[in-house]
Image (cartoon, rainbow, N blue to C red):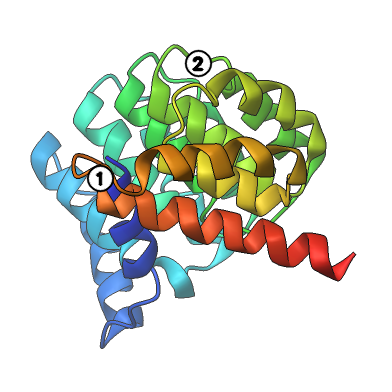
Amino acid sequence: SQFYRINKRKKRGIEYPYRKEVLKLFLSMLASATDSSVTAALLYGIGDNNSCIKPHEIDLLLPFISVQEIIIRRAAVSALTGIHKMKAIRGLIMLSRDRYSDIRNWATFAIGTQTDVDTAEIRTALYARCVDKHYDTRMEAIYGLAKRKDDGVKTYLEKEFFNCTVYVLESIQELHALEYLPRLKVMLEETENDPTTDQYWLGHLKECIESLQGSRHSI
């Protein structure tokens, strides 16, 4: 869910004690792990401590992106997330094409939101997921391109506007897409005083409108 995605984004900023020591230990244990659950747990632990990972250590993680066990491939996404080296990002791009939607979703989140690296290769991978049959995966791709100020994504964003979720609002805000402002204002008028309106969503709607109005006034 998007709530979990936001919590995961915040978690990435946490500094754990003994990070280097824990990473070294988990990487050494990874080579001898034979149980899928243990391997997955180690990969998740590596993901929480990978800010100090070295380039040659990334190579130890890459074989897990193509194993048969879903639990391990999902954990491999976590292990590679937040590593701003192209060899790790290319692994995530491969996982963003996985046949299981949960893996595609988190891998797309990783390359779209969890790194500021911006290359044609990353954008191509994100565009490929803009037509994904899985909604969250699709919207992670759209948001990742919006974050990179890629106006070409507006074609896909427009198709999602009928279901104006927080994903859509965040993407509009990232793009400073002023053309949506009139429709968003109408939406606010129709929902603000409705007791059934989700207040979390309404807060994002108001924030988006305020942001666009500020952009318009600064032009």
Picture quarter with the C terminus: bottom right
The answer to which image quadrant residue 104 occupies is top left
Seen at 29% across and 54% down, the residue is 200
Give the number of marks: 2
State the residue at coordinates (38%, 42%): 77
Q: CA distance from mark 1 to mark 2?
A: 26 Å
Mark nearer the viewer, 1 or 2: 1
x, y percentage for residue 158? 64, 24
Type of residue at label 1?
A: Asp
Residue that extends furthest to the right in the rendered view of this protein: 219
Q: Is residue 118 left or right of 165 when viewed as pictured?
A: right
For label 1, the residue is 198
> Which residue is at 80% across, 60% downward?
216
Q: Mark 1 or 2 closer to N-term?
A: 2
Front residue of 131/114: it is 131
- Indicate the amino acid at tag 2: Asp
Q: Residues within 10 Å of mark 1 (few under 14, many from 20)?
A: few
The image position of residue 142, as x and y in percent, is: 60, 34
Is 77 displayed left or right of 168 in the figure?
Answer: left
Report if residue 111 is visible in the image. Answer: no
Q: Circle 2 — which element? A: loop
Q: In this figure, which residue is indicated by the disc labeled 2?
A: 132
Q: Quadrant of residue 171?
A: top right
Which residue is painted at 41% across and 47% down in the image? Answer: 61
Q: Tag 1's secondary structure?
A: loop
Residue 208 vertical placement versus 77 (above, below): below
